[in-house]
Image: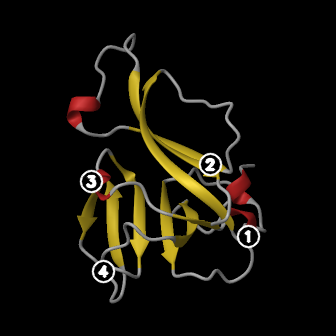
Amino acid sequence: MNLIDRQDTSFLKFIGRLPPQDNYIPVESLEKGAWYWVDKNTSYLQIISPDPHPWSQEWVILPVVDRGTKDLVQAAPLSVSLKLFPLPPLGKATFVEITRQIEHGKFVHTQENLYYFVTFLCQRDDFLIKDENQPSKWVTYLFYPKEKQ
């Protein structure tokens, strides 16, 4: 079972800023009052915001794993949404610094002290590796502990 599969996900409520805007592509909003972006290297990470310009400010950030089904334990994860809420948080939240980086290798791992970590294989055609002996490119999001400001 993954941490995100637990019933109590309150420990996954963060306060922080998004990585720079140039890492994202806007997607047409289907809901009034919600704006969507996807990572430019993978459509499996999206941002859902109540503000059309969420960059350069702090948000309450709730990572939500979409499994496409109601059986959250048995279904494989399909994507991750970072849902943004205005401050102050309802309940407990952890201050973080979110880092987005491109990794190269056969797999991604870390031994760093993190609150949350998610990685995706890059999807753009120029990132796809045809030779299985070459390392792949991955988009990785790291949520580092940060002191309250």
Q: Residue flagged by tag 2: what amino acid is it?
A: Tyr
Q: Are marks 4 and 3 in contact (CB under 8 Å)?
A: no
Q: Residue flagged by tag 4: what amino acid is it?
A: Leu
Give the spatial CA distance, label 1 vs label 2.
17 Å
Q: Residue 94: percent from the left, percent from the top?
A: 69, 64
Quadrant of the rendered image containing residue 48: bottom left
The image's colour scheme reads secondary structure
Q: Residue 121: percent from the left, percent from the top?
A: 41, 36
Q: Residues within 10 Å of mark 1 (few under 14, many from 20)?
A: some
Can you tell which mark lies on residue 22? 3
Quickly name the residue at label 1. 10
Q: Residues within 10 Å of mark 4 (few under 14, many from 20)?
A: few
Q: Residues within 10 Å of mark 2 (few under 14, many from 20)?
A: some
Identify the element where label 4 is drawn. loop
Give the spatial CA distance, label 3 vs label 2.
21 Å
Can you tell which mark lies on residue 24? none
Give the spatial CA distance, label 1 vs label 4.
27 Å
Quickly name the residue at label 2. 144
Q: Residue 61: percent from the left, percent from the top?
A: 55, 68
Give the spatial CA distance, label 2 vs label 4.
32 Å
